[in-house]
Amino acid sequence: MTTIDKNKPVMITGATGYVAGWIVKKLLDEGLTVHAPVRDPKNKSKTKYLDELAASAPGKIVYFAADLLTPGSYDAAMEGCELVFHTASPFINKVRDPQKDLVDPALKGTQNVLASVNSTQSVKRVVLTSSCAAIIGDNKDILGYDNQKATEKNWNETSTLTHNPYSYSKTVAEKEAWKIAEGQSRWDLVVINPALVIGPGINPNATSESFTIVKQLGDGSARMGAPNLEIGMVDVRDLAEAHYAAGFTPEAQGRHIIQAGSHTFLSLGLMLREKYANAYPFPKRTLPKFLVWLMAPTVGITRKFVSNSLGYQWKVDNSKGIHGLNLTYRPVKTSIVDMFEQMIQNGTFKK
């Protein structure tokens, strides 16, 4: 049981990011002081949306200069904090060097942040943003899990540096976090494992692979059809609530699958079509698997991924988060429509 004093500051890495933005909003709305380490605190274009949140909230935000790969750079921001949220990690699919672009920032960043935690006596709890990608590699993996359903006890054992490198980076980073946490007894680790995150950003121009995926549903990229890929999804606003509960629920422990439901990208397109009719070229049909397999290398995915994920169901047990963190979820349709509407407003789709 770990009780966090809300009068003490709370530190969050990646504060200007898509997921962290909503966590920062929740913390500020609850009247907390947020310590936000960023690369360049003087770059107001990066912090302006957080500043706007703080201006109308009872809490306050304080910026510090830090870099994910610079040892010790989080020490100042962490001073006096009992709770640390570590959300910073790259989410990109098209990479030139998986080790440099994905694994190093995820793994070394986690090592760096937790080294500061180990040297900061005030810290009692760390909430780590991991991913369902650390639980499931290919959808086919789920067939080998108990009851053919993923739970928090499962680990992704099929991703590598050359096959699903993003998933591999999340797996090695989370495993390292548990290794470091188990090497001491002062602070505890609570892990959040979200499915694909969707919904509007605090920053309307946020960059995340989530926005790239949703953009392709409406910009004509998928007008010929969508691959039969089923995946779990969760609203970014609900994910923020999950982080907050993980931080401030004394009994919280271990990993938590955070997911509202699972859908294919075709079903997302159909949800958007219900709202916008034919205003955008949403996909209307499922692409044959063999065609996706043939085209895979030209669009930056591997044929192995197509073989092992398309056509397989995505089944997870999300009950631990619902009961342990007292979570409720928005319908996926609400999330995808809110996200798409924000993208229309910010000019993502050119008429």
Image (tube, rainbow, N blue to C red):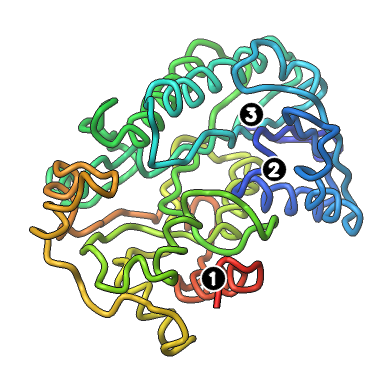
CB atoms at circles 2 and 1 under 8 Å apart?
no
Quadrant that contains the C terminus = bottom right
Q: Identify the residue position indicated by label 1 in the image.
A: 349
Q: Is residue 327 left or right of residue 150?
A: right
Disc 1 marks a residue whose amino acid type is: Phe
Expressed as whole percent of the image width and height from the top left, the position of residue 115 reads 61, 12
Q: Which residue occupies the foreground of this view, 8 or 300?
A: 300
Q: Does 104 appear above or below 11? A: above
Q: Secondary structure at mark 3?
A: strand
Q: Is residue 24 left or right of residue 86?
A: right
CB atoms at circles 2 and 3 under 8 Å apart?
no
User: Which of the 4 image quadrants contains residue 171?
Assistant: top left
Disc 2 marks a residue whose amino acid type is: Thr
Q: Identify the residue position indicated by label 3 in the image.
A: 125
Kindly identify which numbered label has been placed on residue 16: 2
Q: Does 73 appear above or below 268? A: above
User: Which of the 4 image quadrants contains residue 229?
Assistant: bottom left
Count neighbours of disc 1 (C-alpha within 10 A) and say few if under 14, some if 14 to 19, many if 20 or more: some
Expressed as whole percent of the image width and height from the top left, the position of residue 116 reads 67, 14
- Residue at figure coordinates x 57%, y 73% from the top left: 338
Q: Is residue 203 left or right of residue 304?
A: right
Please tell me whether mark 2 or mark 3 is closer to you in this view: 2
Q: CA distance from mark 2 to mark 3?
A: 22 Å
Q: Which residue occupies the foreground of this view, 288 or 315?
A: 288
- Residue at figure coordinates x 49%, y 10% from the top left: 183
